[in-house]
């Protein structure tokens, strides 16, 4: 039982939740198109990040669409408010989706940072194990959010411990491998860290919403927070990783990426006649 099922909602509250959920799956659909269209400007070695972003978009699209349908089905208009219809709304679907998306999102980071071989597999295993532990312990805790009994707090604290470990690992991967990136991509990599830090912090806030704001307005705030976190940590994150991948591809002479850099000059690539431009034309077949 999630605390969304405890309240009746006025028109504004009900509509805002339904609209923000529909915005969420619409953004995921747009993100899917973007990642598929831009994949060709990334060198094959790094193109997996666009493929994985597309996987995340598909997964998140169906999750948010299902949440929207559950919200619409869980409440009916009685002439003065939207009241329970007998069907329960559940945030549990979010956790199922995160168990797919979080490992994939973290693997993308390893790809664009150029980590390979045994080290890749070691960090990947830590990301997957830590990510799933964080998600499933939070999933266990959310079943107790209505009464906010001890399991709600205990599982929440355990999930937070894995959450902090993952953040530390993400910071280590980014800042420990900046030297692998061309200078033009390092600022974007730092921006990825700040995006992860801020967007991920929204999730524990939404988890704690029943304790902080136990009302229909709190429900609205939680659904807005969860959806904003999903958009920033999946779509914006994927876009930034794609920018890094294109900049690295351009620095390595991949033709399409060099052409993109020429079209929007950054990192000193401003002239098709320069060395990068010549490498790009020679590298179109790669």
Image (cartoon, grey):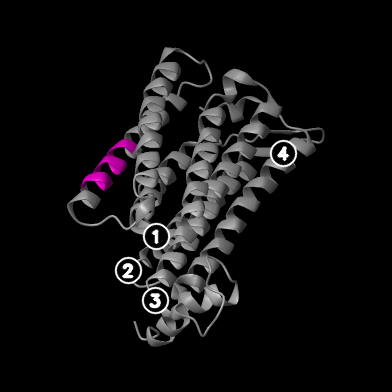
Residue at 36% from the left image edge and 53% from the top image edge: 179
- Please tell me whether residue 30 belongs to the stretch shown in magenta: no
The numbered mark at residue 253 is 3
Q: Residue furthest top?
A: 150
The numbered mark at residue 14 is 4
The numbered mark at residue 45 is 2
Considering only order in the chain, which callout, 3 or 1, is on the residue closer to the N terminus? 1
Residue 55 position within the rendered picture, expressed as x and y whole percent measured from the top left: 42, 60
Placement of 238 over or under 84, stated as above or below: below
Residue at 49% from the left image edge and 66% from the top image edge: 35
- Magenta stretch, residue numbers: 122-130
Camera-nearest residue between 120 and 7: 120
Q: Nearer the viewer, mark 1 or mark 2?
A: 2
Asked if the residues shown at circle 4 and circle 3 are in contact, with their CB atoms under 8 angstroms apart, the answer is no
Q: Nearer the viewer, mark 1 or mark 3?
A: 3
Placement of 130 over or under 263, stated as above or below: above
| Circle 1: element type | helix
Residue 209 position within the rendered picture, expressed as x and y whole percent measured from the top left: 59, 25
| Circle 4: element type | helix
Q: Residue furthest right?
A: 80
Q: Main secondary structure of the magenta part?
A: helix
Considering only order in the chain, which callout, 3 or 4, is on the residue closer to the N terminus? 4
Mark-to-mark CA distance, 1 and 3? 23 Å
Camera-nearest residue between 112 and 103: 112
Mark-to-mark CA distance, 2 and 3? 12 Å
Q: Residues within 10 Å of mark 4 (few under 14, many from 20)?
A: many
Which residue is label 1 attached to? 52
């Amino acid at each position: 039982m999630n605390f969304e099922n405890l309240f009746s909602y006025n028109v504004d509250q009900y509509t805002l939740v339904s609209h923000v959920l529909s915005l969420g799956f619409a953004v995921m659909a747009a993100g899917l198109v973007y990642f598929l269209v831009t994949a060709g400007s990334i060198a094959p070695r790094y193109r997996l990040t666009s493929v994985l972003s597309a996987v995340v978009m598909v997964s998140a699209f169906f999750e948010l669409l299902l949440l929207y349908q559950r919200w619409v089905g869980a409440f009916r208009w009685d002439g003065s408010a939207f009241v329970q219809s007998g069907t329960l709304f559940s945030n549990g679907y979010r956790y199922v989706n995160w168990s797919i998306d979080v490992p994939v999102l973290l693997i993308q980071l390893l790809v664009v940072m150029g980590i390979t071989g045994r080290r890749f597999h070691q960090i990947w295993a830590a990301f997957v194990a830590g990510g799933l532990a964080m998600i499933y312990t939070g999933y266990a805790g959310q079943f107790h959010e209505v009464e906010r009994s001890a399991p709600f707090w205990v599982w929440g604290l355990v999930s937070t411990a894995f959450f902090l470990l993952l953040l530390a690992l993400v910071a280590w991967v980014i800042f420990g491998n900046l030297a692998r990136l061309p200078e033009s991509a390092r600022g974007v990599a730092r921006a990825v860290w700040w995006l992860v830090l801020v967007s991920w912090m929204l999730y524990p806030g939404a988890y704690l919403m029943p304790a902080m704001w136990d009302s229909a307005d709190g429900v609205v705030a939680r659904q807005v927070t969860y959806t904003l976190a999903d958009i920033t940590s999946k779509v914006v994150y994927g876009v930034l990783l794609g920018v890094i991948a294109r900049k690295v591809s351009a620095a390595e002479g991949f033709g399409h990426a060099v052409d993109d850099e020429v079209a929007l000059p950054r990192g000193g690539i401003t002239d098709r006649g320069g060395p990068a431009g010549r490498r790009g034309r020679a590298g179109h077949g790669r």
